[in-house]
Amino acid sequence: MNEITRRHFFERTGLGLGAMALQSILLRETPAQSGNPLAPRRPMHPPRARSVIYLHMAGSPSQLELFEHKPELEKLHLKDAPPSFLAGKRFAFIKGVPKMLASQFRFARHGESGQWVSELLPNFSRVADKTTIIRTVHTDQFNHAPAQLYIHTGSPRLGNPSLGSWITYGLGSANEDLPGFVVLLSGGKTPDGGKSLWGSGFLPSVYQGVQCRTAGDPVLYLSNPEGIDREVRRRTLDTLGQMNRDAQQRTGDPETLTRIAQYELAYRMQVSVPAAMDISREPQHILDLYGARPGYVSPAETADDPRIIYKGDDPTFANNCLLARRLVENGVRFVQLYDWGWDHHGSSPGESLDETLPIKCRQIDRAIYGLLTDLEQRGLLKDTLVVWGGEFGRTPMMQNNVRTELRKGFIGRDHHTNAYTMWMAGGGVKPGLQYGQTDEFGYFPVENPVSIRDIQATIEHLVGLDPYRFNYPYQGLNNRLIGPTEEGKILEGILA
Amino acid sequence: MITRNLKFLVILSALVVLGWFRSMPVSSAVQSEEPPIRFGRDILPILAANCLSCHGPDERNRKAGLRLDLEETAKAPRRAGTPVKPGDPEASLIIARITSADPDLVMPPPSSHRNVTAEQVKLLRRWIAAGAPWGLHWSFEPVVAPAIARTKSHPIDQLIDSELAAKGLQRSPSAAPQILVRRLWLDLVGLPPAPEVADRFAASPTPAAWERMVDELLASPRFGEHWARMWLDLARYADTKGYEKDLGRTVWPYRDWVIDALNADMPLDRFTTEQLAGDLLPNPDQSQTIATAYHRNTMTNDEGGTDNEEFRVAAVKDRIDTTMQIWMGLTMGCAKCHTHKYDPISHEEYYRFFAIFNQTEDADRPDEAPTLEMATADEKERRQQLKSNIDALEKTLPAFDRPVETPGWRTLSIGEVVSRGKATVKIEPDQSVTVSGTNPPEETLELTVALPAGEHTAFRLEALPEKQPGGQFTLGRNNTTGNLVVSEVRAMLDERPVEFSRARADYSEPDGDIARAIDGQEMTGWSIKSRGREPHTAIFELARPLRLETAARLRLTISHQNGDSSALRRFRLLTTGLEAGKIDIPTWTAEIRRNIDALAEAYDSFNKFNDRIVKLPIMRELDADKQRTTRIHLRGNFLEPGETVTPGVPASFHPFPAGAPVNRLGLARWLVDRQNPLTPRVWANRVWARLFGTGIVETEEDFGAQGTFPTNPQLLDWLAATYRDQGWSLKRLLKTIVLSETYRQASEVTPPRQQADPRNLLLSRGARFRLSAESIRDQALSISGLLSSKMGGPPVMPPQPAGLWRSTYNGLKWVDSEGDDRYRRAVYTYLKRTTPYPSMITFDGGSGEVCQIRRIRTNTPLQALVTLNDPVFLEAAAGLAGRMVSASSVDSQRVSHGLRLALIRKPTEAEIAPIVSLYRDTLKHFASSPDKAAALVRATRAESMAGSDPASFAAWIVVANTILNLDEVLMRH
């Protein structure tokens, strides 16, 4: 028996004991039956999306420069923030009474749906009709690492499985020659929450995200060592397989058969992963659609402080978007992109709203347009949920502990938890919808507030998992992504 | 006593037992052929999962005033009926409600997303029919060692046999001697034996020889290195602080303490006390202080803008959770936010427990204080030398903290100073002004100065440095850079501007000339960067000299608009009536400047050296007058304080030791108290699981109502009692277990056994499971002859792929170790929490972020890629190839030798043949592709071993790589 199955709950169900919340999973095909922990499993209800591409802008972009058009804020520009904005609030950096800060960019309505989008995202504006823009997401964490952990693992502390791990655990993966949960990074740094953001927590480690790198081996140790070619590797695996099969005859241990299969899978991955990762196989017009450039290695990757050398035409994020489409096309369940460098405080060079944000927007604008357009033209968008957002939003006030007057290249906002913007597109989500409304300054939600739990519940629901019943028993609790309380709600209003 | 005992033993089960309660046997009550029902195993989990969240201990959420966690209330008649009517399932309300077809009546309600299965209903019916006997959750019953027959047979074997007999099974025969020796070595020291060691035992496999080998291994220093890993997983040991920055943390002396403690077989009660409360022992020695680093393994968040108190509280909560999990096998986490739904741990009790841990000095500070400095004698001496250098240089310098008197100049009296940046300003007796406190990026100082009667031709600004805690003088307020920038100086007399004709300074940066301080522009200024460690002087000549009949009030503004917090720190103002052409600028001599620079360097060397001296984070109790008041955190939020609580443990546990202080020391004693049934069970089970792959309680992390029932409760209790009663000796416990025949069984599976006990939970055969991440590495290095036996010290960095470490704002670099350190045991590998060593996590090792009770073994293609392609394993393959080649000149003998080194047993001809042909085929391949052979030899650092025949050696590397990937090599069997 595969060791992965030696988890008490499978056994326990046989004894007819508790944890019946699991039953819906147990009735479906389990890894125990297939021998492969990543074998596809039936969803708990008919899914609206088969795959997820989650684009996380680490550092948290300003909703007030991108999606939240607030003319009233201009009237208060550089005036002291009203006391109601400050009473009882904790900020990461703001001290005392900060000044309000109008949006630094112009807004217009776009498409048939009339979505408000700023001038920083001209290409995204062309596909805004495909998206549901949620303007009222709120969180309760105001530091990067805890807030990223909260949205991706359901807990601001470490030790819980990530969204991608949960979904891969719940549904398996459709292509067994590729990892089920792939992580791609850009922006030159690992997101603040580190690898725990795609860790498997208390789930078996097979469900952790596999970081595919754009430089070096896409998957660690994928390449044979220098001097060992595919022919020699085949020969060693043949010998290994033969000896392991003979040994298995003697020991009777089914685990050995799984190991033989995993070595063969590794051998196939040596071809399938680089092939899936190789965007140079795409025709020029597709590369152009995303603004992708195969083989590009960004200087940001090795810079001590990549923010000060960001270039708007850096195609790393675009390459990752194109890669995400290829992976999803090949049956990968969950593709997680992290793009670092969105923390625009205005306190040091390379982190301003007026100078750095436009560069970051150029890096993603065409790429996202390309991704949504390409998914749609291939008929993949209806089965692929695309999610975009940061870990929190940014304050309608400028960050006052840096300076009290506006200075070019140093305009910034602090972390804001009460309301920020995320968008979703594709599988099961209404196109061209604006969901939720904030007050005239974008400070608080006034209609349809959306919690992080709601976002998580909705994503699970869309892929065919019941967020309330889908759980994993650990340390005496039936642990769920959405936490122990029932506060998380599926956002019925955005479902197509 | 017995009732009191029982009362305290109810914990997670939620079955708070009242004074009249007696636990009673249940199994005899059922006459049918169906297996007997045990309340704690069969019924309680159903109630816990489905009923107790609304009908349990949590008063606030209790519905209909009904409690089903107490026998008394569950069996008491109510208006609607009796919830549990013994002997009459159909008259029992819970059956009626659970089976109701009415969505408004059915329990649990559909909105709860829970449902009771038909199978469970059947169990409940049978239980009620049998009289609904109540009971305790099994793990809270006292540990009672079962009676053991006085036969020659080992108690463990007797207890295993009785369970096997019930299933019609028998134990398997003993494994072959060489297999047994390998098993014992891997289990006790985590390394394979040399084949000769196994052969010696095989020649005379007597019980005495076996026991001798057990004793030798338990006495080996390798023992502590292996078993430390289990403890370090629990202690969430790592070499970095975690979270966003994940900076390095020097905590390896604690890791070495654990290894030493295990090698010395420190009893569990002492092991517990020193780690939880070594600092509270009378006159703790250095070792007992190091032990307290155990609870300093919590993470520290250095991310900018974080609230230190928030993460201090998070660390304290982590200590509570970790302590409960490790010793009691229970989680208290739910009670952080509200009274436990099905456990009698109230919200208040959680914070009483919290109060015990809430009195230590540590507070999520970047410097990790409090720390224990562990300077060696050499380090102390060297540091003293460096300090002497500083002292000698300081003597050569004038006093910087006093203005230099110069003829013709008068110090101006300062009337008033206002800092627009809200800094604290002070006028010193010598009329210098010091600026401290808030240090905004931009600052403007407004001064009112008494200008005496007489002639004034120029003003002078003396910027004075101050000594920092690190010893360095800095001129500007930015302690990191020491820079000073004066953007603009303006003067007003009688509401009219005083114009300056010229400004001069003893020093300016090339891009920050003093002239920029009077150019009328705020964005330019006088700047001092490279010489920011000494005083500097600027002279501002007046365009029109002032001739004052009487004293006047001069208003001066000195602004800093550079945005980098480098305004003046301390300064003095002077005036002169000297003719403009006769004003000299006092400057420092070249010698003094040299000495200033030398002093800066001396401080730098001292600080750098001092930073490298180990400062181990430790626990230290706050002084009595500084103790924190602990309040309940409403909804678990530390910003919502509730009632004040006193320290204590939950009332439903066993009592706190009489007379013990209610602090960490008392808590440690409470955990290892004889009345505590959980600690010995949890620990014995943990040790058993390391030897048999799975615990007697499979859910090692959960001994509560939701955990699994022990597969052999009597065996667990026998082990728990033995462990506790034999002085809590881990080595004795291990020895006891490995001397049993149960341990020594062959691991081969026969079809009948496979069918009767597919997961080998009853142990009708030897355990077979994949080695741990650490053992896989250590074994490969050992087989290849590369493994270093060096113990202890700072963590090492064996090869890992380039570019893995790229944490935000983190200057740490991974530099592949060379020499011995490249081949150290895995326990010494640097563990960075946000980027753990890749081959370790691929084989299910942890990140050290939170307490890891057990590792769930997986079997993945990524593991195959590690052992096939990771340079560590390729270098090991080259080492093994070298050993094979030097053993013989005959191919088949070389193969046989390689297999023996890896498998320990003698390989069969059928095993040798395919590998010989692999060698020959590969040799042919390399002979025709010499470049590839050379490349492989180079990549595995095998040039010297390969000598003049790289093709042949490369082929042997391929062979060795194959051998090291054999399933049998990766398995402990």
Image (cartoon, coloured by chain):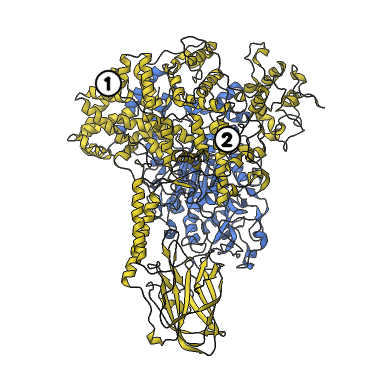
Chain colours: A blue, B yellow
- State left or right for residue A259 relative to residue B19: left
Q: Quadrant of residue B892?
A: top left
Q: Is residue A429 above or below residue B547?
A: above
In this view, the mark in front (1 or 2): 2
User: What residue is shown with label 2?
Assistant: B667
* Residue B103 visible in image: yes
- Amino acid at pointer 2: Leu
Q: Amino acid at mark 1?
A: Ala
Total labels drawn? 2
Give the farthest residue toward the right.
B79
**Chain bearing mark 2:** B
Label 1 to label 2: alpha-carbon separation: 62 Å
- Please name the residue shown 21% across and 37% down the image: B944
Quadrant for the C terminus of chain B in the image: top left
Q: Is residue B312 above or below residue B704?
A: below
Element carrying mark 2: helix
Which residue in the structure is indicated by mark 1? B913
Q: Position of residue B578 (x, y in %)?
A: 42, 86
The chain letter for the residue carrying disc 1 is B
